[in-house]
Image (cartoon, grey):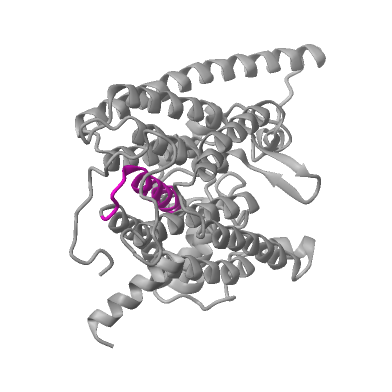
C-alpha cells in the first residue's frame, strides 16, 4: 500500500470512528486492565471468590466501552451535548461534592464516596470533578478569547472555578487538588494565555492552598485538643492512649495532620531497605519490594509475589504489580501509552480550527495522563503516599466510567475535526451556542491534516 493510500485509509477511519491512535491506546489499556486487575486481586479473592473481582471489573469496563461507543458518534458542538457536559455535569458534581463533605462514607480516613445502590454502586464525586473542570474551563476559555489570548475576566472566572472545586475536593485528597491545578495549567497554554499570566495564576493557587492548609491545621489541632479533654473528662482524668490507626479507619480524621506526616516522611526518607515493616509504611515497603522483584523483564503475568500482602494492590498500587510481573520494560510501556495519548491529543489540537474542541481534547488527555503520572510517581516514591487510581487499569467503577467518557469525548472531537471539509459528510464548524466559535490560537495549517 502506497503512502497516499495509507493516508486515505487513515482519513476514512478517522472520519467514521475517530482517531485510530486513540482507539489503539484505549483498547490496549483495556487488555492490560483485565489481565493485571485479575493478577492483583488476591486479597479480594479470599472474601469474594475467584471470579467475582474480575467479573466486576469487566462489567465496569463494558459499561465504559458502551459510553465510548455512544459518545464518539456525537458531534461535540451539538447544543444538547454541550449543555449536558458543561452546566449539567457541573451541577451534579457540586451537589455530590457538598453531600460527601458532610455525609459521605469515610474511606482511609477521609470522606470520599456516596452510596447510590447499597452494597452495589458507590460514587466518588472527586472523579466527576476532574471531568467537570475540563468542560467548564473549556467553555470559559473559549468564551473569553480576545486577540488569541484569554481575557482578564476569563482568567478570574477560571481561578474562581478551580478554587471552588479545590476547596470542595481537598478534604478527599490533596493530590486531587494538585491534579486540578495541573490540568488548568495545560489548558491555559492551549487557550493562548501568556506565560506571565499563567505564572500569576499558579502563584494565586499556591497562596490559596497555603492559607487553607494553615486554617485547617489549626482547626484540626483544636479538634484534637477538644477530643482529648473530653476523653479525660469521661475517664476521670486517666490518660488513655488511643490507637490512631483504629480511629482513622472508623471515622474521619484531621487530614492536615495526615498530609503533614506523609510529607515529612517522604522528605526525610532514606532508603527503605533499613526500615522495619510497620502498619504505617507497609504500602511503601511492599510496593518497592514488588518493583525490585520484577527486575528488567518481570516474573511473568500472574506470578506476582507481593499482590497477596500489598494493601490496595488492585487500585492505588497496581502499577507496582505491573512492574513486578512485566518488569521495567512493562512499566515503561504503560508510561509510553499515557504519554502517547497526550502527544496524540496535541497533534489533534494543532490541526483544529476552533479553540473549544482543542481545549476539550487537551483537557481530557491532560486529565488522564497527569492522573497516571501521579499514580506512578506515588508508587515509585517520587511523590508522597496518596490515593490515585491508574486510569482504566485500577479497579473502581466511578474512575473507569469517567475515564471512558473522557476517551469518548476525545474520539468525538477527533472525528468531527476529521470531517471538516469532507463533502460526503459535512459537519457544521460553528457551535450552536453563541460565542463558542473562537479560532484556535495554536492551529498549524498542514497540507495533509492526518498524515
Q: Position of residue 58 (x, y in %)?
A: 66, 66
Quadrant occupied by the N terminus: bottom left
Residue interval drawn in magenta: 351-372
Which of the 4 image quarters holds residue 178? top left
Q: Residue 259 versus residue 103: which sits nearer the camera?
A: 103
Q: Position of residue 283 (x, y in %)?
A: 56, 52
Q: Position of residue 46 (x, y in %)?
A: 76, 64
Asked whether residue 443 is drawn in magenta, I would say: no
> Residue lying furthest bottom in this view?
1
Q: Residue visible at 50% across and 42% down?
A: 79
Q: Residue visible at 81% across and 45% down?
A: 118
From where the camera sits, is residue 276 visible? no
Q: In the figure, is residue 60 to the left or right of 52? A: left
Q: Residue 174 versus residue 349: which sits nearer the camera?
A: 349
From where the camera sits, is residue 283 visible? yes
> Residue lying furthest front in this view?
423
Q: Residue visible at 60% across and 53% down?
A: 401
Q: Residue 84 versus residue 63: which sits nearer the camera?
A: 84
Q: In the figure, is residue 389 to the left or right of 195? A: right
Asked whether residue 362 is drawn in magenta, I would say: yes
Q: In the figure, is residue 282 to the left or right of 371? A: right
Q: Position of residue 284 (x, y in %)?
A: 51, 51
Quadrant occupied by the C terminus: bottom left
Amino acid at each position: 500500500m502506497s503512502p497516499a493510500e495509507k493516508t486515505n485509509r487513515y482519513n476514512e477511519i478517522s472520519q467514521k470512528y475517530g482517531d485510530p491512535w486513540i482507539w489503539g491506546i484505549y483498547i490496549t489499556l483495556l487488555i492490560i486492565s483485565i489481565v493485571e486487575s485479575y493478577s492483583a486481586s488476591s486479597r479480594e479473592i479470599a472474601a469474594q471468590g475467584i471470579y467475582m473481582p474480575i467479573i466486576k471489573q469487566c462489567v465496569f469496563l463494558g459499561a465504559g466501552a458502551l459510553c465510548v461507543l455512544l459518545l464518539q458518534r456525537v458531534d461535540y458542538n451539538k447544543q444538547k451535548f454541550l449543555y449536558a457536559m458543561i452546566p449539567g455535569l457541573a451541577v451534579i458534581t457540586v451537589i455530590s461534592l457538598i453531600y460527601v463533605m458532610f455525609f459521605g462514607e469515610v474511606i482511609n480516613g477521609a470522606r470520599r464516596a456516596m452510596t447510590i445502590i447499597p452494597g452495589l454502586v458507590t460514587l466518588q464525586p472527586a472523579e466527576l470533578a476532574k471531568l467537570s473542570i475540563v468542560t467548564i474551563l473549556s467553555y470559559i476559555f473559549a468564551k473569553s478569547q480576545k486577540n488569541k489570548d484569554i481575557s482578564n475576566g476569563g482568567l478570574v472566572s477560571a481561578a474562581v472555578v478551580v478554587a471552588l472545586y479545590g476547596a470542595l475536593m481537598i478534604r478527599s485528597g490533596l493530590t486531587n487538588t494538585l491534579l486540578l491545578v495541573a490540568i488548568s495549567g495545560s489548558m491555559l497554554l492551549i487557550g493562548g494565555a501568556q506565560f506571565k499570566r499563567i505564572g500569576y495564576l499558579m502563584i494565586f493557587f499556591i497562596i490559596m492552598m497555603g492559607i487553607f492548609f494553615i486554617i485547617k491545621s489549626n482547626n484540626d489541632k483544636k479538634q484534637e485538643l477538644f477530643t482529648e479533654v473530653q476523653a479525660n473528662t469521661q475517664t476521670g482524668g486517666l490518660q488513655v492512649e488511643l490507637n490512631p490507626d483504629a480511629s482513622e479507619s472508623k471515622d474521619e480524621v484531621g487530614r492536615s495532620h495526615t498530609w503533614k506526616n506523609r510529607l515529612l516522611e517522604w522528605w526525610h526518607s532514606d532508603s527503605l531497605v533499613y526500615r522495619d515493616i510497620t502498619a504505617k509504611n507497609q504500602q511503601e515497603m511492599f510496593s518497592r519490594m514488588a518493583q525490585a522483584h520484577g527486575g528488567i523483564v518481570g516474573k511473568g503475568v500472574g506470578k506476582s509475589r507481593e499482590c497477596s500482602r500489598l494493601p490496595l494492590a488492585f487500585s492505588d498500587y497496581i502499577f507496582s504489580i505491573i512492574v513486578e510481573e512485566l518488569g521495567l520494560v512493562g512499566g515503561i510501556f504503560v508510561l509510553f501509552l499515557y504519554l502517547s495519548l497526550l502527544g496524540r491529543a496535541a497533534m489533534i489540537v494543532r490541526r483544529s480550527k476552533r479553540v473549544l474542541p482543542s481545549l476539550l481534547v487537551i483537557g481530557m488527555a491532560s486529565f488522564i495522563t497527569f492522573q497516571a503520572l501521579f499514580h506512578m510517581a506515588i508508587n515509585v516514591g517520587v511523590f508522597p503516599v496518596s490515593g490515585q487510581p491508574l486510569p482504566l487499569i485500577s479497579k473502581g467503577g466511578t474512575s473507569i466510567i469517567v475515564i471512558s467518557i473522557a476517551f469518548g469525548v476525545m474520539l468525538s472531537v477527533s472525528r468531527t475535526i476529521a470531517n471538516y471539509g469532507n463533502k460526503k459528510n459535512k459537519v457544521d464548524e460553528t457551535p450552536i451556542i453563541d460565542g463558542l466559535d473562537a479560532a484556535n490560537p495554536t492551529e498549524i495549517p498542514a497540507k495533509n491534516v492526518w498524515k
